[in-house]
Amino acid sequence: MSNVNGVLVIDKPAGMTSHDCVARIRRLYGTKKVGHTGTLDPDVTGVLPICVGHATRLVEYLQELPKRYDVVMRLGSTTTTEDASGEVVEQAGVDAASITTERIQALFESFLGEMEQIPPMFSAVKVNGKRLYDLAREGTVIERQARKVTLYELTLHKISVDGDTVDVAFTCTCSKGTYMRTLCVDLGRALGYPAHMKLLRRIKSGPFQEQEAIPLQQIEEQAANGEDISRHLVSIPQAISFLPSFQVKPERIKAVRNGLATALPGVTAEEGSLICLFAGEELLGIHRVCRGDKGLFAKPEKVFPAEV
């Protein structure tokens, strides 16, 4: 399969790493140019956009976008990994009557906005060249630097009582790099109980939603049956349609293709923001909006070949 470019939005199954999914897609589409836009842990399912061909140049933009998750937090125990895969290290009976809708909603409200979060030891963050989860498996615990993340939305769905434990199901929309496991631990601590993340599913990543995600197994079956799986790829222009666009005048198309800056008459975009330059329906490139003596102009970041 040649000249394949676009974003494949898969529904990642449990039991596979994001890297495993990338390796499968490389084989299916016959190209080494494949990359994902945000790691999902092996036990986590849901939306994983994978860039193929020239679309790999979009990874840095797509991975910066907010994510949305369906989460189940279990109150009553915490684990070594902060999720259900770890060993229980602390338990406490939960007074279910105290975990009310009003209390949870008030707690969610207090957590919204920018906050500092310390990455869990069982995470892919690198410290001095080593993944934290590799250090954790060796029994090493090191100090981790807090990072700023943003919670945009926390929506309660259901509170369920299970013996001495209580499960709280909710949806979270957050910035890139937010750890739902750590959020569950922090929410539980605020409620006065040990807690961990019982279940997690990503339902949106940037512009891509759960409804358009295709199970990886389905794509593999179609490929085995000789079907055209390139039809599942979201085109590069469509994948970045969340960015503003500007139509380049015919006499400037060649200059833009050659990587030259071009003026943006009539554009009111914010300086430093991104803009896509088009010639008709053809994407010429992704540019950074800059301000010069004569007004705004587009400075190229990514210039795309004509076949894109």
Image (cartoon, rainbow, N blue to C red):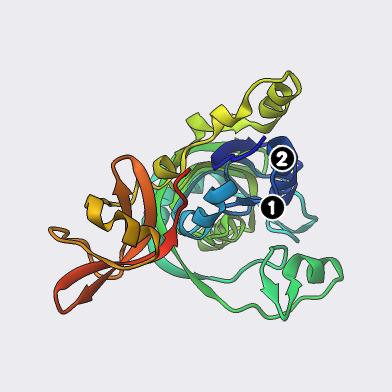
Tell me the SS state at disc 2. loop
Tell me, for residue 28, which label it has, or none: none
Nearer the observer: mark 1 or 2; the answer is 2
Q: Which residue is mark 1?
A: 83
Tell me the SS state at disc 1. loop
Q: Amino acid at mark 2?
A: Gly
Q: Which residue is more in the foreground, 71 or 185?
A: 71
On screen, residue 287 above or below 214:
below
Q: Which residue is more in the foreground, 42 or 98?
A: 42
Q: Position of residue 115 (x, y in %)?
A: 44, 69
Pointer 2: residues within 10 angstroms few (<14), some, or many (20+)? some
Pointer 1 with pointer 2, Cβ within 8 A: no
Query: Based on the displayed image, in which of its 4 quarters is residue 39 positioned?
Result: bottom right
Q: The N terminus is located in which quarter?
A: top right
Q: Position of residue 132 (x, y in %)?
A: 73, 70
Viewer can see residue 39: yes
Q: Which residue is mark 2?
A: 30
On screen, residue 216 above or below 56:
above
Q: Position of residue 77 (x, y in %)?
A: 69, 54
Query: Based on the displayed image, in which of its 4 quarters is residue 217 positioned?
Result: top right
